[in-house]
Image (cartoon, grey):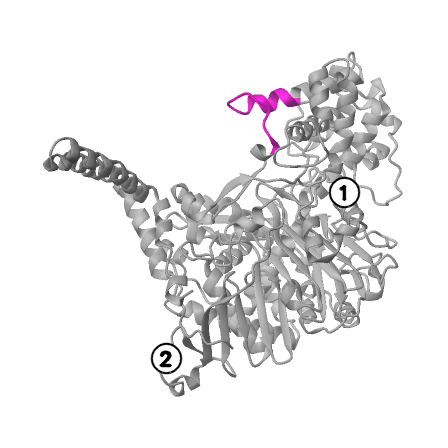
Amino acid sequence: MARRVVHRPRISRLLRLPSVALLVLTAAAAVPLAVAAAVVYRPIAAAVPLVAAAVGATAALLCRRARVAVELRMARAMVGSHARCTGRESMPGLESEVRLRVGSDGVTAIEAGSWLDAVRALGHVMSRDRGFQLDLMRRTASGRLSEVFGRGTLAVDRRYRPLDLAAAADRAAACLDAPERELLEAFAAGVNVQLASRARSFESRFLSYTVPPWSVADSLLVALYLFHGLSWNEEAKRAEAVIRRALPAPVAEFLLPEWLPEGDAGVPEELRRLREAGVPEDGLVSVDQAVAGSNCWIRGGPEGPLLACDLHLPLAMPNVLYEVDLTWPGHRVRGLAAPGLPVVLTGTNGHLAWGVTNLGADVLDLVPVRDPDDVVTRVERIRVRGGPTQTLEVGTLAGLPVSPRPLLGERVALRWTGYDPRSLDLRFQRLAHARSVDDGVRVLDEAQGIALNVLLTDTSGHMAHLATGLLPGAAGHLAPPERPRRLDPPSGVLVSANDRALPVPARPVEYDPDPGHRARRVRDLLTEDTAGGVEGMRRIQHDVAAEAYVPYRDLAVAALTGRDEPLAALLASWDGTARARSTAFAAVVRLREILAGKVLAPYLAGCRELDPRFRYAFRSIDRPLLAILATEDPALLPPDEQALGWPEFLARCARQAVQELRAAHPRRALPRWGRINTVGLHHPLSGLAPWSGPLLNAKPRPQPGAIHCVRTCVPGFGAAGRAVMSPGAIDTAVFETPGGQSAHPLSAHFVDRHRAWAAPAPEPVRRRTGLCFSVLEPADRSAVAGKETRGTRRPF
């Protein structure tokens, strides 16, 4: 395919703008009428429908001329900012030429003469593809969105500005070791070359603002923002404090997350005396909250080990992950990174493959403020575009932010590991240079960093699963040898899915870990013969078995038998999966939500009295709920339902679930799961200009999967990246991401990867071909380069 065709802007996408679509539809309707009039009457008659259409379209556009002007502004911004294959381009700071190849999947393969030159080029191409996203992430983390978006983002700024993440990133930047500082300086230099060029992102053109230069601290701010999303469990800690104050100790232990795997799941006697009638369950109990996590597993075999990883993160347009492919003398690394952070989170270098999952570490504490005079108050000024500057009082205690919300009548400071500069040492990035599992373990043992599960495997078949980062211990933080780990298991299998998979130290490092349904399912599938090879791993990634919901189906079927046979038959027909076509699964999901509210809310009424914003939303919710249901004790029924007995109560809840689903859909028919579970990608500008949604967003489509399935996929949350890698075969690594590599709506790579990602089963991997070859050359050698070779297709 010729370069000029590949990189030509996809102007046809502008037809998705409302005014353009109106003109096209008007013309499409007028032309056939004009032809018919000319044939039936006389040629001059063709002018009548054409003139009528022109007048009507003009009148419609004049009535909405303000909107038309904004749409025209967006269209001009897109057309004027579309990236093209440049051929040769000078770049300050390079030591030697860097060759770039944009592949058919939109990924830019970078071949450089040194590691730091490769990172400089990565900054350049990442800023080219995702420049606005880089700025958006640092603005979100620092509470400065309203400077660009206006009043609509004030709530976000009021949430993040008091956390003072920017100051924490600055402190950490001053403590970096030389390799990490050089890495971030090289990356920032590459980003800033692109930002200083005339090729501004379409978003910044449309919003009429200039993106400030990138810095070392900005990359650390992005890392801190990601860590915040993984570990900031303030609401859960508040709920725990309220539960412990409001309820007897045995009941509190029963309702709270287990500290030990062997914890007693029995129902305490005190529970029977706590029920209150008439407690509204809406909002008091929350089920299946989306928590950043991941699946990652390794399976050994005679043909070498394979590592698969799904990174579960919020879904957006553009995607929160970016595929990289870097080559420098004697080295190559492929994998997925976060825009703004030149660190491969999951990837391979041809010798070692690694993946990460959220450890769910207990790294946040609510510290009571004993003396109000110890709180230092400052005033933050939030600049608001198009409006007056807002002020915000922020309190700190010994450098820690003080929450504006009291907890049980007293103020609390937020002590979080992310404020320790050691959490941002970024030594994790050295895995890109490791040659074996032993090297990787050594790198992680010498690092502090963000609390994560890290899985490693190498070409010799060794494998390891380590808990890394600053982890809580009996006195401060665990030393590297004390961190939980598992090396070369006899089974030849390692699995981490945010569950408690590692040996438990004296004090567990996790808080409210995943109940383990995904991990158990992956382990079962890995024992099957069909799980071998890359394609076997990819099939596992799309598995939709829904074990977590089976007990509720069984309870409902038993209760409905003899009471409502058609509904019992419907639920009994469910095959235990979260397929998009399943009707019964939608009813089972809603039944679980209803039971959680009706059964648990009466015991939590006292908590709501202590804290009007109290919400019970732990991931371990099924343990106490199923324990109560299993007793069949009438004394544990909700007071308003006690006269019915458990079977009738369960039957009524099942009927309620079906009735609510039917009422929520116009045809009053029981919807399929895919009709409820529609997943799309939303661009931040579509919130500011909703009419741009068809152009900027990826349309929601029915999706299989659920929170507790291996294929985690629900609205706004899912696998932001899937990877399957063999450490010894770097070219066979498979990476899937939603949306596309480019953030430009007119790019061929804006949504080109989305269809394969959204497919219910893995699609065949297409061979990557080079579509654009270009060269970055040192600025001081640009005059010697001779004639510009724009768009050369000569391979490396």
Q: Determine whether the residue tagged by mark 1 lies in a helix, strand or loop.
A: helix
Q: Is residue 11 above or below residue 712?
A: below
Residue contact at pointers 2 and 1, CB within 8 angstroms: no
**What number of labels is visible?**
2
Residue 308 picture location, percent across and down: 70, 56
Q: Earlier in the sequence, mark 2 or mark 1?
A: 1
Can residue 198 be seen in this snapshot?
Answer: yes
Residue 672: say if magenta: yes
Residue at the front extreme of this rendering: 39
Q: Position of residue 336 (x, y in %)?
A: 61, 61
Residues drawn in magenta: 657-673
Q: Which residue is mark 2?
A: 788
Q: Position of residue 676 (x, y in %)?
A: 58, 33
- Amino acid, disc 1: His
Residue named by callout 1: 517
Residue 89: say if magenta. Answer: no
Name the one closer to the observer, 366 or 498: 498
Quadrant of image for the N terminus: bottom left
Q: Is residue 429 left or right of residue 563?
A: left
Left or right: 136 with respect to 291?
A: left
What secondary structure is found at the residue carrying circle 2?
A: loop
Using a 10 Å C-alpha cutoff, classify the residue at mark 1 as few (fewer than 14 neighbours), some (14 to 19) or many (20 or more): some
- Establish if 236 lies above or below 417: above
User: Is 704 rendered above or below residue 203?
Assistant: above
